[in-house]
Image (tube, grey):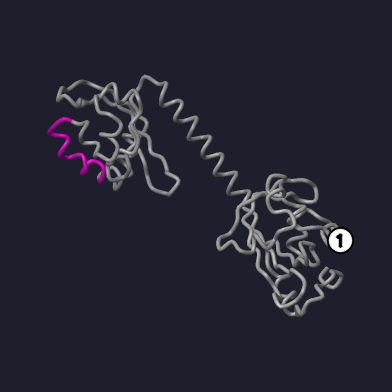
Amino acid sequence: MLGSVKKSSLDVSDCCYGVLDRLGHFICHCENDVIVWVNKAGIDIMQAYTAEAILGRKFTDFFDEDYRELFEGNLELLSQETESVPLIVLTVNGTKLNVILNVLVTNPDTDKECYLAEFYDISPYVKVSVENRNREERINAILKTTDQAIVEINEFGEIKSFNEAAIKIFGHSKRDAIGQNLSILIPEPHSAKHHQYVFNYLANSGARSSIMNNTRELEALRSDGSIFPIEISVTEQRAMDGSTVF
């Protein structure tokens, strides 16, 4: 494909194009915003059968409408950015891609405005992020409406979340509870031993199987010092950072 692609009239060597053609993200060379060369990966990413579907067109023509109005015909503005620029581009078929873009000035001593533009498709990561955010919103909605106290702790016993029902039942505000050890909800003598309980649980698979998803009757401690009976069920999950939460 490279042999059939029009090269820039600037002093860009075949060796340079050859190296760029081996990279797996979109790269193009532009003269006055017009694409004069694109690498093989760029052709595939833009869902084009041939380079000719891309060559001769303004690079900014592929930007989503909002970004096109902002940067149309002005790659110089993008080249001045010191950080990668997040935006949305459209493939030849109109598919939207979330990308991060970098633009570099090439051959600045000529009378043409020439740029090397590259972007990385981050659409899969954006999709996962949106799905996780939607999932978190659904879970938060459930936590707010349930009448059961739901308390999430990490493997060190620190409280990470405290729903509305937990606030009413235990008497602690969310601000006071989060970051504290779960032992604040446990009366003595079990409160002082809670750290050891968590350690034994993590170290003993047998203890996990006997406790996991089984309801147990225990005593709990309110913020006013009163003790009351509760039923507790423990589940184990993986947080997004890979840590264990309960």
Occupied quadrant, residue 119: bottom right
Circle 1 — which element? helix
Question: Residue 233 in the image: x percent, y percent?
Answer: 33, 29
Q: Is residue 62 above or below residue 169?
A: below
Q: Residue at x 65, y 64 (%)?
A: 103
Question: Residue 194 in the image: x percent, y percent?
Answer: 20, 39
Q: Is residue 133 above or below residue 146?
A: below
**Residue situated in front as seen by the camera: 131 or 109:** 109
Q: Is residue 130 magenta?
A: no
Q: Residue at x 25, y 39 (%)?
A: 180
Occupied quadrant, residue 51: bottom right
Q: Is residue 166 above or below residue 17?
A: above
**Residue situated in front as seen by the camera: 162 or 212:** 162
Total residue callouts: 1
**Residue situated in front as seen by the camera: 138 or 71:** 71
Question: Residue 32 in the image: x percent, y percent?
Answer: 77, 64
Residue tagged 1: 52
Occupied quadrant, residue 227: top left
Relative side of 134 to 63, left or right: left
* Mark 1 nearby-residue class (10 Å; few <14, some 14–19, many ≥20): some
Question: Residue 44 in the image: x percent, y percent?
Answer: 76, 58
Q: Residue at x 70, y 50 (%)?
A: 89
Could you tell me the amino acid type at mark 1?
Answer: Glu
| Residue closest to the far front | 111
Relative side of 33 to 98, left or right: right
Q: Quadrant of the N terminus?
A: bottom right
Bounds of the magenta segment: 187-199
| Residue closest to the far left | 189
Q: Is residue 192 magenta?
A: yes
Q: Residue at x 20, y 25 (%)?
A: 222
Q: Is residue 139 above or below residue 109?
A: above
